[in-house]
Image: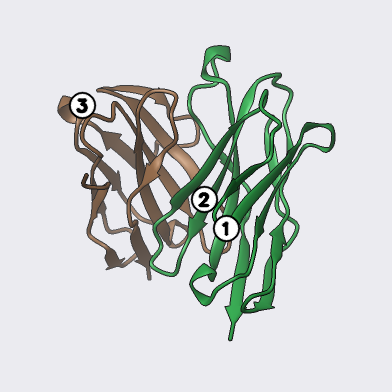
Amino acid sequence: AQKVTQAQTEISVVEKEDVTLDCVYETRDTTYYLFWYKQPPSGELVFLIRRNSFDEQNEISGRYSWNFQKSTSSFNFTITASQVVDSAVYFCALRPDILTGGGNKLTFGTGTQLKVEL
Amino acid sequence: EAGVAQSPRYKIIEKRQSVAFWCNPISGHATLYWYQQILGQGPKLLIQFQNNGVVDDSQLPKDRFSAERLKGVDSTLKIQPAKLEDSAVYLCASSLVDREQYFGPGTRLTVT
């Protein structure tokens, strides 16, 4: 069975602070994919990143960065110099490798509500 | 490129009534998904289509929920009869095979 845990229910920061959102996952698969999605108040889930389990390199995209550590089954997301527009619910998700017969089914965590205040 | 379209955006019905939601995926995306997102939770997959065929409907409450994807493009999700616990946001997503999923704006259903 697959499971994603986002222990932080809600985080509040002041604009320009850095913030890290934690994600811990469980899977028996040797190959899998990890994702982060953003859900602003409008409700639409916005794709942020997809990471293959074979690729443990950290990734940076503008103010966003992701730290994948297979040894601790974690895929944490950091926003540098946060802005009010970053306020949203962020979801981490896990998917088995389609070649193992797992289809393309995403297992989501419960999300972390990020509030960035002036 | 147009995103995933869904309608209606909001729906309020009484319990035991029926309701239908519509989804139009991104052009060229063979895979279509319906998710249910209850307040405070992550989305839960209800059904996945690959073209016209069902890939996974293991978490679809088949006694009251049904879905179809005629001609491998648009899809409709129906609930009949609705229960109070069906109040949620229903999200449609689409993807190329083995690629990331792109979500629509969702339909917020309130059952009273």
- The tag on residue B34 is none
Residue A41, placed above or below residue A22: below
Disc 2 from disc 3: Cα separation? 26 Å
Residue B66, placed above or below residue A102: below
Which residue matches tag 3? B72
Which residue matches tag 1? A90
Disc 2 chain ID: A
Q: Secondary structure at mark 1?
A: strand
- Residue B40 pos. (x, y %): 58, 63
Q: Split into 4 quadrants, where in the image is the C terminus of chain B?
A: bottom left
Chain-order first, disc 1 or disc 2? 2
Q: Nearer the viewer, residue B81 or B13?
A: B13
1 and 2 marks in contact (CB < 8 Å): yes
Residue at screen point 25% across, 54% down: B19
- Residue A50, quarter of the rendered image: top right
Looking at the rendered structure, the kind of residue marked 2 is Tyr
